Amino acid sequence: MQQTLNLHDREELIAPLYQFDRKFWTTLAVLIVIITPGMLLYVRQLVLGLGVTDLNRPVFWGAYLVNFIFLIGISMAGTVISATLQLLKVNWRRPITRIAESLTVFGLMTAGLQIIMDMGRPDRLAFTLIYGRLQAPLLWDIASLTLYLLTAVFALYLQLIPDIALLRDTAPDTAPAWRKKLYSILSLGWTGAKEQWRRLEKAITVVSVFIIPIGISLHTVTSWLFSTTVQPGWKSTILGPYFVVGAIFSGIGLLFIATTFARQYNKHLKEYITEIFYTNLGWIFIVMSAVWFYFTLNETLVVVTEQETLEFPVMASKLFGQFAPAFWGMNILMIAATWILVAPKFVSDKPTRNPLLKTITGLGATAIAIIIFFLLWLRLPALAAPAIQTGLLIAFVLFLIFALLGITKWMKTRLITSTVIASAFVLFGMWLERWNILMPTLTHARLIPYTTYLPTVTEIAITISTFGILTLMFVVFYKFFPSISIWEVEEGRALENKSGG
Amino acid sequence: MNFPLEQPLFQFFYWLVNTPGVGAAVVGLLVGTAVTIFALTLRWIASAKSAEQESYPYPPQH
């Protein structure tokens, strides 16, 4: 059946799956080097117990839980975005749906790992179910996560079936027998008959409808782990939607980074994943950024103005206490990301004589802003006077503005690079946001003396390992399956030809 | 005024949300139902019989 498929597509998208070149092995080796220290330290944690971390009462959730919420967030967006675009019949979605859906599956798997890492005795994992009572939000989270993971795997698999059949039919003679057998089993005897397509399309549509509320429920339930307690800083009615908005925001960021990584890894993908994807999804990214700022302002302003006895110390620790670097760092990253996305839309392509819009001005201002930031951070005794500190803060803000203005013109001509930089800022900012939700409350818990928390080497190494594992899954998966939905791209081309586009 | 927990219905709800293990049963039911539906859907797609020999690389209605 697939003889009608574009031979060019087959060459560009299928041939690389059988080429285990030096680039692949180098990537694999680098990832293993990144993952190994964390895994070794996890074994040490398993033997010696959670005492090797800084986790203790009342800070019983630390970096692992921050990673868990962050990963749940990025995984929520992939399939939800893909399903929404699928239902709206958006044509530019076609080359990115598979990457989006696989990010969901891998993100959920690595998120699940964090729970095991966080348990001093992972052999007691089954106790959460055996002794789980229906009133516990933790149990709802397990239910939502399991259901979302199963549905996401199913959605990914449904969309893969026609492409697996293509791999089965076009496998080169040199391909290993086990690989041919694997494609043969997974293709479920797909022949591309009219009735099979009809049923597959129906199933994809139904799953797309159901997966959106399941995805939203997962992140809402995760927020209920916090908001159903009486801890200051957590008992908020908008924490659910705030989590969902943050999840979609960070998920789009990861989608941009993953697709760009795939484009760089396989240069042929540049023909398929074009700038139109960055432009169109970029607009959704900008909208999500505005909604995220709206929720952050709500969460901050209400607590600051009411100055309630238990709530305010948590907020104060974020505004000017031990969590101020994380809180203001998050805000600066998000403002910079929004600027990178929005500002280039307001400047022209033509050369300018305005010195503020010169790249050299931007680079110089960035360097000065970084120096001032470190001066502020280090709190040198010579610069400790309040007037000097205030002056430094004002200078930092001014040079940050100059830096952002200076790089605007440069970003205008580099849509993909600037989108990736903005996405990296958003991802780091969102990790800090999760940190700012968890840690200030846990260190300022109700009715318990205040304490501090700093992740140990074990927690930092395991966090780095986690992101290494996520990337490893991505790299290995796309060595066995095409990273672009070939049949969807072909369908898009046929539609374009039909409409004369 | 009657206390709600004197009613058998509320006693049942209390048992439902407070009994260890019931949560696991609910999670099991959810997961079991989902897996069954997914397996049946795959079987339904794979079993599609068509009289025509023609096959298509993408949905043919276009």
Image: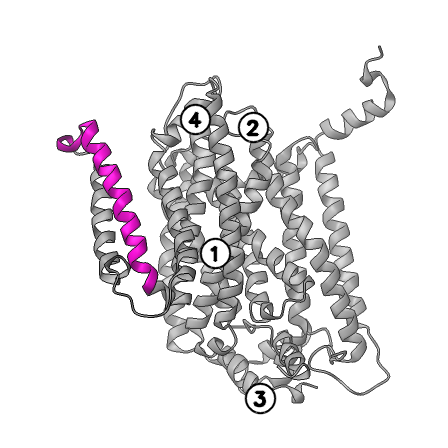
Q: Are marks 2 and 1 in contact (CB under 8 Å)?
A: no
The prevailing secondary structure element of the residues shown in magenta is helix
* Label 2 residue SS: loop
Spot occupied by residue B17 in the image (x, y as percentages of width and height): 73, 29
Query: What residue sits right under mark 2 in the picture?
Result: A235
Identified by mark 4, the residue type is: Val
| Residue at mark 4: chain | A
Query: What residue sits right under mark 4 in the picture?
Result: A314
> Does the magenta-highlighted stretch encompass residue A394?
yes
Query: What residue sits right under mark 3 in the picture?
Result: A7
Residue range (magenta): A381-409
Query: What residue sits right under mark 1 in the picture?
Result: A253
Which of the 4 quarters of the picture holds residue A138? top right
**Which residue is more in the foreground, B18 or A368?**
A368
| Residue at mark 3: chain | A
The crowding category of the residue bearing disc 4, from other C-alpha atoms within 10 Å (few below 14, some 14 to 19, many at least 20), is many
> Does A352 sit left or right of A60 as displayed?
left
Marks 2/3: CA–CA distance: 58 Å
Marks 2/4: CA–CA distance: 12 Å
Mark 3 or 4: the one toward you: 4
Marks 4/1: CA–CA distance: 29 Å
**Which residue is more in the foreground, A279 or A170?**
A279
